Amino acid sequence: MGLPKGFRKNIKIVRPKEGVARREELIEDFTKKGTFLPRGVSYEDMDKSFIEFADKDLELSVDGEKIPVIFLTLQRWSEFSKTWQHSDKYKNIKMPFITIVRQPNPQVGNNQAGLFNIPGRNNYTYYKVPTFEGGRKGVDVYKVPQPTSVDINYEIRIFSNKMRDLNKFNTKVLKAFNSIQFYIRIKGHPMPLILNSVGDESNIDDFENRRFYVQPFEIVLQGFIIDEDDFEVIPAINRALVMSEIMGTPVSPRFTLSTNTTKGTFSYNVVFKQRSEDSFNYKAEYSSKYTDIINISGTNNIVIKVNSVEVFNGIDFKNSFVVSAGDNISISIDRNTYTLSKFTLIGNII
């Protein structure tokens, strides 16, 4: 049972992607065959894709037999007409058939909306691929140059001795270009075809010769060339371990002297700040006798040396000691990390 007239098949219920999502979809399509770089495109690739367009998208059959399509150059036409395999028993060329001729003068292209390339042939970041090597995460940057736009003129001709064959092919061509542009995919890259003109080269005036119809279609491929030799893959570190060594200025403990000449007494107030050093040296200003240590705070142990000889080690002061003016006195402490420590040394001037 046939479907009713106007019945639509293959209805797309998913809305096509647009904008950035569409561009990402195109990139995924470029790379789906195992490479993160776009595939190169040459003149040969564009010729091959155009032949496939004429052979498949414009396919025409007559009496159940597909019309042959042959790609020719201007120089080979006379040679090919003599060796054409589709001939009748009288060795005449059998019609209909379709030919494709590419003009050998590609022009500066309009694929980039008529804009010219950036000078210098710089490479630009195309894709970033994460890597993992030796326990280190990184990324490879894939760079490609801007493609070179090119316009290529093709001429498709149909040769036929029947007008209805000509009409069928003409209809197929006009339907294909109903939206002005027809896109073909060359190694995954969409490129537009534009129908420039439809002509007539029919040989129907000379009644003594064989009469036949010839209709040429001039089509422009707005393509671009991509040379894979210009691609670059540059390794770039994504995560690196950076160590810095900071040399700070040492912080000395605060050391102040108070004297009472009337009573002949003195006191040294010592303060070790949180980040100060744990030891310091000074010279005795007077010949004196150290008798006690008071106001101890934040200190686990105190060591005092006179001229490198240890005279006190601990916290409880039990035995006094005598120093002479000019003696070198060294004081060091033991405390918890970053703890404020302080104490006071007292004695008598001799």
Image: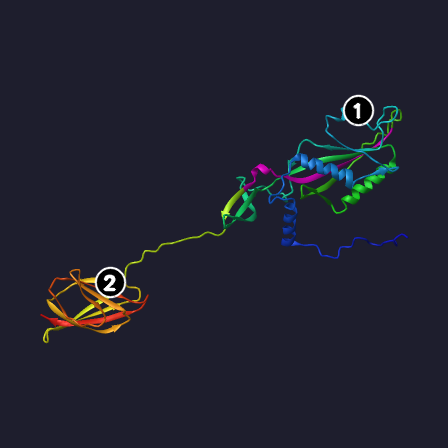
In this rendered view, identify the residue nearer to me: 88 or 157.
88
Q: Quadrant of the C terminus?
A: bottom left
Residue 270 position, x and y percent, is 22, 69
User: Toward which corner of the image does residue 263 lie, by quadrant?
Assistant: bottom left
Residue 248 coordinates in the image, percent (x, y): 31, 58
Left or right of 65? Residue 42 is: left
x, y percentage for residue 159?
82, 32
- Residue designated by label 1: 83
Q: Which tag, 2 or 1, sits closer to the chain's start? A: 1
Q: Which residue type does callout 1 highlight?
A: Thr
In the picture shown, does residue 9 fall above or below 327? above
State the residue at coordinates (31%, 68%): 339
- At x 81%, y 40%, the residue is 170
The amino acid sitting under disc 2 is Ser
Q: Which residues are magenta?
A: 211-232
Q: Which residue is mark 2?
A: 279
Is 334 drawn above or below residue 65 in the view shown? below
Is 230 situated left or right of 4 in this image?
A: left
Residue 259 visible to the viewer? no
Using the numbered discs, state the Cα–Cα distance from disc 2 to disc 1 in whole angstroms.
107 Å
- What secondary structure characterizes most of the magenta part? strand
Q: Is residue 104 magenta?
A: no
- Tag 2, which secondary structure? strand
Q: Is residue 47 left or right of residue 160?
A: left
Q: Quadrant of residue 89?
A: top right
Q: Which mark is residue 156?
A: none
Q: Quadrant of residue 336?
A: bottom left
